[in-house]
Amino acid sequence: MLITRMRHAGVALCLLALAPAVLSAQQGTLTMGIRQDATVPVPYVGPATAGNALVTDQLFLRLTGLGTSGSTVGDDVMVPELARRWFRQDSLTVDFEIDPRARWHDGTPVTARDVVFGWESLRKPVLGVTQAPFALIRSVEALDQRTVRFRFHRRSSEQVYVAGFLVQPLPAHLLAAIPADSLTTSEYARAPIGNGPYRFVRREPGQFVELRADSSFFLGKPGIARLIFRLVPTSDAQVNLILSGELDVMTDAPASALPQLSRSTTHRILHSPGSFITYLLFNSRSPADTGTPHPILSDARVREALTLALDRNRIASTSFGPGAETPRSLRSQAWYWLGGGKDAGRADRDRAMRLLREAGWRDTDGDGILDRNGKQLALTVIYPVQSPLFAGIGVQVEQMWRAIGVAVQLEPIDGPVWLQQRRAGRFDVDIAGAEQDPSPSSLSQSWSCASAAEAGSSNVGRWCDPECDRLRDAAPASADPVVGFRVALERMAEWAPMVPIAPTNRVVVHRRYDNVTVRTSRAWTALWRWQIRPGAALPRDR
Amino acid sequence: MGSWAVRRTAGAVLLTLLGSATLVLLVQLLPGEPLAAIIGDRALDPVTEAALRERWGVGRPPLTVLLDFFANAVRGDLGVSLSEQRPVAEVLLGRLGPTLLLGGATLLINFTLGTWLGLWSALRRDTAGAKLLTGITLVSYAMPGFVIGLLLVWLLAINWPLFPAAGYSDPLLASDASAWTRTGDVLRHLALPLATMVLATIAVPIRMQRSAALETRDATWVRAAIARGVTPSRVAWRHIWRPALGPVVTLLGLWLPMLVSGAIFVESVFAWPGLGSLIASAAASRDIPLVIGAGVLLVAVVQLGSLLADIVNRLLDPAQRNR
């Protein structure tokens, strides 16, 4: 009896000892630097900037989330968020059942009507949402309060991903009365009411956005009580704030600052697979006349030689630090689930020179620049002047190509003019970068024959390979979609329309956080699971 | 004086209107994607793109844009910012506080401490102290503002964390903090940007005041005052400083726009939410309504600064006052 009592007392003491630790794990603050202000953190409504996306992901859930693999193919790879389950009715119909515990932050239940409203909103042209990713969906219908039915145009293993991840519910009870073209400037846009783990508290324009944990969040209490997203537009200022201890998290740390940041005793650097991809794009059409093939770059041997002349490993590591890779095709690290496709990334100048000789390029006048039929092998490389990263890549490319006899003219252009110039196809080589969508199907937006034929499309290099299109479009409905996508990407690599570099997410994180997960796509959707390590709380966490 | 002031003010208003109209028209000629702030390099289908262009008034004739701008501006409506998705007037107003604080404090220190140091070094022209001051001010003037800023951050925010490294206020401050606490917090954040701005610019008023004071030091009325037995401090302030103030006041007028445009590099180093960085990012992203709104504000402030300088100069100089 006594022993039992002592045991009980011991357990009670242990619980008492643990209590502060548990308490601190459910409190605390996280301050993260953002480079673009979160002006309107509402799905589909605000401009599609990184700042808006980051905050939106804390305020709004999707019907389904991506699993740990990041795969988008199959009905069972997605994980429940607002939808607690989904049922396939037939090959063209999927029903989602909304979790009855899901609530908007004003207490109103999330309903099937909200999903339909989200779908109808994103289709309004005035909101400027890119429609291509939703092309698979034929209709969205509320069957009852909690069941929403998606019908699709064709069979695809990505139906659940497209419906559950890409279509986000919006609060119909708050927004239905607001005209679509007034949404961005509405009171709702200034203080959004979401359904995610964090509630909107306030925004000081030009300074910060503050969110508070929703203690009634139906998927569990968020580990950190308060999130502050501080607008710090420059990397240098963010590094200073990290070093002075005023910032807990910094994203996309510049490679040049990594050695200094790695010496920090309070922060650590996390290299996790990311969805960003940088590439040198070869224009397949003549800049002077986009109706004709490019006089130099339409030759596959020249493109291969230019790729082989580059020490891509060196460019990757100097631009992005360790962990950056040189994939064989346009594949960020978010598409690791496809497997295969990495490249050694080493330069092979001898082979590059051989290929150029085979293509007829020789230095006949001894000026160090190759020529053919009296014309020099000269290329113009454009990039936005606002990007020091692309400028650094440009300088390295210039030196490496110059070493094999290619004259390079670097042309930094003001951002909006660069957008216009590349869309018009007025360039030889373009340095660009993009956050890749979770699905490889998204390549059709900028890397397909249909987009090549469309004036002003984002297929600015006018790359077109009908066979690649066929392979990619057939992949989601094939017996093994993963292999299907992989084969399509391999086919793309053979043509070499660009030279890709796939960096990691370079995140600087304060050491007091536990359960730190940075996802490959929509990197910060797991932020609500982060916690303060027991006993590691700072005064500002209380 | 009265009729001169009315004529001068009317001229300033007219120039402001003309400057604004020129700005509105010139901005229409800017190359580049006018909706870059919204669509970036995303792929949009033609219907969506057309709807966006219509909503934001892209491609309207310049004259229509100009007339609409003035018609709306009369009502205080400067349009909606593409990047901020808020009324331009509201965006500008939000940035005005930090801008006035940093720019105003810089001007205040430059033209109080600066003129005093300028006069002091003129009166002690050949002393070691004056030479040292000249050397220090020349070195700080030669250094780019952002280098001074980075040095101060490294020294006083990272190595000795006395001041915040960046920002305008502490976002962690409790929302119910007292006004004193808030003011103190803003002043702590102001310290390093202000020190940077002052170090980078104070050499100008010092040098200008010094050379003006050196010229008046040997003037006949100064020698007469000394001969009359006027006290040295009265000679310094009344007979040397006041007549030598004209060039400095003109400089003050020209520097007033700094209140609005701020110092882009300093704002960038310290993530200071001022108008300078806002204008730079608006121009870089072709946020045309915001560029126009901020530009018109700058034109107005330039005119206002010039007008004020002329009025003060006239008040200081009896010869001009009676003309």
Image: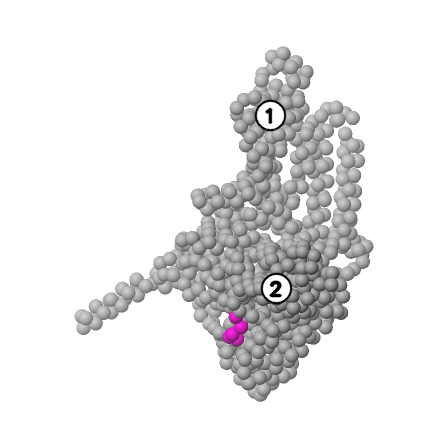
Label 1 CA crowd tier, 10 Å (few <14, some 14–19, many 20+):
many
Chain of the residue under the numbered disc 2 shown in the image = A
Q: In the structure shown, which secondary structural element does the residue marked by tag 1 occupy?
A: helix
In which image quadrant can residue A393 be found? bottom right
Q: Judge whether residue A340 is colored magenta.
A: yes
- Image quadrant where one finds the C terminus of chain A: bottom left
Check the image and report above or below for B240 versus A380.
above
Between residues B155 and A26, which one lies in front from this camera angle? B155
Indicate whether residue B4 is drawn in magenta: no
Q: Position of residue A438 (x, y in %)?
A: 56, 72
- Residue plotted at (67% across, 34% down): B251
Q: Amino acid at mark 2?
A: Met
The residue indicated by pointer 1 is B119
Give the mark toward the camera: 1 or 2: 2
Residue under pointer 2 = A353
Q: Quadrant of residue B32?
A: bottom right
Vertical comparison of B51 with B227: above or below = below
Residue A346, horizontal then vertical, whole percent: 53, 64
Quadrant of the image containing the N terminus of chain A:
bottom left
In the rendered image, residue A70, in percent from the top left (x then y), is placed at 51, 73
Q: Magenta region: which residues?
A: A338-342
Q: Residue at x 61, y 40 (%)?
A: B104
Give the prevailing secondary structure in the magenta stretch.
Answer: loop
Question: In front here: A474 or B46?
Answer: A474
At 58% from the left and 88% from the top, the residue drawn is A90
Relative vertical location of residue B9 with respect to residue A85 in this rendering, above or below: above
Q: Which three-letter amino acid code belongs to the residue tagged 1?
A: Leu
Q: Residues within 10 Å of mark 2 (few under 14, many from 20)?
A: many
> Which residue reaches farthest bottom?
A90
Residue A200 visible, this orientation: no
Q: Are marks 1 and 2 on the same chain?
A: no
